[in-house]
Amino acid sequence: MFYSIRHVTRFRYSSPVRESVMELRMQPRSEGPQSLRSFQIVTNPRAQLYAYTDYLGNAVYHFNVLREHEELRIEAQAVVEIVAMPPLPGGADPLEWSRYNSYNLSDDQFDLLEPSLFASMTPELAAFIVAHDLAKPKDDPLAALRRLNTTLHQAFEYTPGVTDAQSPIDVALKQKRGVCQDFAHIMIAIARSWGIPARYASGYLYHRGSCQDRSADNATHAWVEAYLPSLGWIGFDPTNNIMAGERHIRAAVGRDYCDVPPTRGTFKGGADSELAISVAVEATHAPVRHEDFLRVARPMSSPRPTPSMPEHLYHQQQQQQQ
């Protein structure tokens, strides 16, 4: 399946600002069943883009705008291919819990067992765990995570505006409402308390008309990936009570949202700012690859050597318009 993604971010300022510095994590990852076919970023005002790969393997772009401006617009476009994934078993091996040890886990996976800024144990979360009988899983890890996914979906209402990007999980726990970022952080914190490495996945969700998704179709999306030694990284979407699959397009992964915001930056000036975002994800056709459309118009031919031929020849290279 091929998807076309258009992600536009606009910052408006109440008065001219200068020296905007911005960091972007918008480029879909290319690994496993997901392959990035094309990607581009355009900014207005125009700026020189620089890129690097962070320690989590995410593509990071950054730029600065030095001249005064009253609006900053960032548009990212991508085409991604996601192939069908084999179905998961109903449960994991009975010995799966015993595989969470130094022999089967790497240093990076051990790091994802530690509390992080937005995904850590709090008194509110501890009370939620007790109230929903989540302290000690009775099932294998895969079945336990599936049950947790459903429990969170049923325990919280999807309500934008109750929390913001910097809200701790206690806000959603007290309100019993929130958005995908809140649900992902709560699930990560609980999974880590069980001894399961878990990470935050940021990206996009393709919304089909037949799917009863709670998440908004014009925004970025977030879900959870948990590590099972015998199966690898498995995605869970507590917002929509589904497993992450062919409709989930991964842009970045991290310990929590703090590692993977699509945009992060600052500016110099005394203005107020307004943020507007538009996201469109559509099914599309396979992009034309460069090697697919090349047609040989004139085959190679070797000139016949002659005694008077110079050592270096100059050949005209022209195309006939047809």
Image: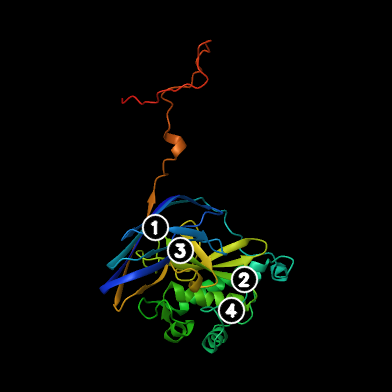
Instruction: Check the image and report above or below for 322 versus 275.
Output: above
- The extreme left residue here reads 15
Residue at 50%, 63% in the rendered image: 252
**Disc nearer the start of the sequence (2/1):** 1
Based on the displayed image, in which of its 4 quarters is residue 217 positioned? bottom left
**Alpha-carbon span between mark 2 and mark 3:** 22 Å
**Disc nearer the start of the sequence (4/3):** 3
Judged by depth in the image, the label closer to the viewer, 1 or 3, is: 1
**Disc nearer the start of the sequence (2/3):** 3
Q: Can you identify the residue that label 1 sits on?
A: 48
The x and y percentages for residue 243 are 51, 64
**Residue 197: mark:** 2
Q: Determine whether the residue tagged by mark 3 lies in a helix, strand or loop.
A: loop
Seen from the viewer's position, the closer of residues 212 and 109 is 109
Q: Determine whether the residue tagged by mark 1 lies in a helix, strand or loop.
A: loop
Q: Residues within 10 Å of mark 2 (few under 14, many from 20)?
A: many
The x and y percentages for residue 17 are 30, 72
Q: Can you identify the residue that label 3 sits on?
A: 25
Instruction: Check the image and report above or below for 310 versus 57.
Output: above
Q: Residues within 10 Å of mark 1 (few under 14, many from 20)?
A: few
Q: Is residue 288 left or right of residue 303?
A: left
**Alpha-carbon span between mark 4 and mark 3:** 23 Å
**Alpha-carbon span between mark 2 and mark 4:** 11 Å
